[in-house]
Image (cartoon, rainbow, N blue to C red):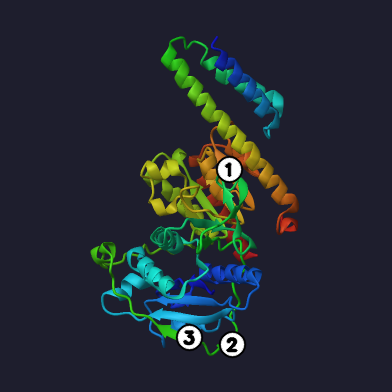
Amino acid sequence: MASLVIAEIDPSSSQLQGSSLAAITATSQITSKIGSQENDIHLLIAGYSSDSEAVNKAKEIPQVSKIYVVPPNETSEKLFKYGVAEWLAPCIQQLHEKYKFSHIVAGASTFGKNVMPRVAAGLQVSQVSDVTGVEASDVFIRPIYAGNALSKVKCTDPVKVLTVRSTAFEKAVLKEAQQLPVEELSFTPDTNASKCVSWLSEEVSQSERPDLTSARVVISGGRGLKNAENFKILEALADKLGAAIGASRAAVDAGFCPNEMQVGQTGKAVAPELYIAVGISGAIQHLAGMKDSKVIVAINKDPDAPIFQVADYGLVADLFEAVPEMTKLLDQNAKTAVHS
Amino acid sequence: MDYRVRLLYKRFLLVGRQYPEPFGIVREKIKRGFQANSTNCDKPSIERALEHGEFVLKEAQALVSLHKYRTLNKRYGRNSDEF
C-alpha cells in the first residue's frame, strides 16, 4: 500500500511549504520501515492543474512516485488552494476509498491541523498529531503534557492519519525533475458541510516584521504592558533588532493584540535564538511555547516572577523605563558603528 | 488547622528542594504565601486558598521540569556547543 502526503502550497508563490517537505521526509522514514515493495509515496496537490508550476516543482522531490491533482474550477479554486477543510477533507476521503492508503500524512501547520482531524473523523480512525519521531510503520513518538514528556504511541487503525512537526524532520531536498505519473481527480462536493462553505475574500495582515515562528529574535509582551497602546514601545525595539512580536495569553485575552501573536501552548511555539519576555510573569503554558529558545531574556518588575527561573538573563526593572532605554542604546550603537 | 493545609505545605517543601532557587529563599517564599492566608477561617475561603495552592504547586512542579529540560538541552541537545 502506498502512503499519501497532502501538499501545502503557498498560494502566492506556488512553492511547496517547508512543512510538506518535512512531512515527505517523515513518510519516507515510515515507508522504509515497512520494507515491502509497495511503499510508494504519493502526493496530493489540490486546486492546481497538472501543468501548473506547483506540480512541476513537486516533480523535483525524489521520494515522490505519483502525484494526484484536483484541477480547479471557479468555485473550488480558492477553497482548495487555501486548504478549506470542508472541501479538502472529503476529497482526501474519496481518494482514500479509491486507493486505500496505509498512511495519510500532512505537516502540523495550521493547514494540517485544520484538515487532518476532519479526514480522520470521516474515516472513523484516530489521528496521531504532532509526530516528532518514527519508530516503526505504526509506532510514533509525539510530545504530551505541553512537551514535558514524550509518548510512544502504537496506532492500530487500518489507515494512519498523521500530522508531523516540521521542526523534527529535515526538509526533503529537491533534485532534478523526474517524469512522474500525474492523475487528475474530479471532486464533487457531496456532504452538506462542503455545500455550505463558499469563498468570500482574504485579508492578509501586511507586516514588515519576520514571521513569528521562524524569526531569529522574538520580543513578547504580557499583561505588564497594561494596554494596547504600550505595545508600541515593543515595536520600536523590535524594529531595531529585526524581531517579531509575540504576546502572552494574558495580553491577548485582555485585547492588547490580535490572537495570531500569541505564544504558548494554545498559540504558536517559537524557538528563536533570542527571546525577550517583557512584562510576562511566565505562566507555564506560555513557557511551554518558548522553551526551545536559545537565550531567554526577561524584563519584569516582580523579582519573584517564575520567568526568572528559566531566563538566562533577567532584569528586574520597570519595563516602561528599561525598554525605551534599550532602544536608545541600540540607536547610539548603530550610530557609532556607522562613524567608525 | 485543616490537615490538607499541612499536607500542602509539606508538598511545597518537597517541590521547593528541586526549585532552581536556593532552598532557603524558596522556603521563605512558601512560608510568606501560607502566612498571608493564615487569617482565613471560614470554609469557602479555605477551600479557595487550597485550590489556589494546588494550582501554584502544579506551576512550580512544571517549572522544575522545564528548568531541567533546558539544562539538559543545553548540555546534550542538538547544537549544544553553540550555547
Question: What type is the residue that disc 1 sits on?
Answer: Ala
Question: What type is the residue that disc 2 sits on?
Answer: Glu
- Residue holding disc 3: A56
- Mark 1 neighbour class, 10 Å CA radius: few under 14, some 14 to 19, many 20 or more: many
Relative to the observer, which residue lies in front, A108 or A326? A108
Label 2 to label 3, Cα distance in Å?
Answer: 11 Å
Q: Identify the image quadrant of residue A118.
A: bottom left
Q: Chain of mark 2?
A: A
Q: Position of residue A28 (x, y in %)?
A: 61, 72
Label 1 to label 3, Cα distance in Å?
Answer: 47 Å
Q: Position of residue A141 (x, y in %)?
A: 61, 55
- Mark 3 neighbour class, 10 Å CA radius: few under 14, some 14 to 19, many 20 or more: some
Residue B52 disc label: none
Residue A176 disc label: 2
Relative to the observer, which residue lies in front, A126 or A65? A126
- Residue holding disc 1: A298
Q: Position of residue A8 (x, y in %)?
A: 45, 71
Q: Nearer the viewer, mark 1 or mark 3?
A: 3
Q: Element under label 1?
A: strand
Q: Element under label 3?
A: helix
Quadrant containing the N terminus of chain A is bottom right
Residue lying at 46% horizontally and 75% vertically, measured from the top left: A99
Q: Identify the image quadrant of residue A111.
A: bottom left
Q: Chain of mark 3?
A: A
Q: Are marks 1 and 3 in contact (CB under 8 Å)?
A: no
Q: Element under label 2?
A: loop
Residue lying at 41% horizontally and 60% vertically, measured from the top left: A114
Among the two numbered marks 1 and 3 on one chain, the one whose residue lies closer to the N terminus: 3
Specify whether A207 is left or right of A23. left
Relative to the observer, which residue lies in front, A326 or A133? A133
Among the two numbered marks 2 and 3 on one chain, the one whose residue lies closer to the N terminus: 3
Q: Is residue A102 above or below residue A264?
A: below
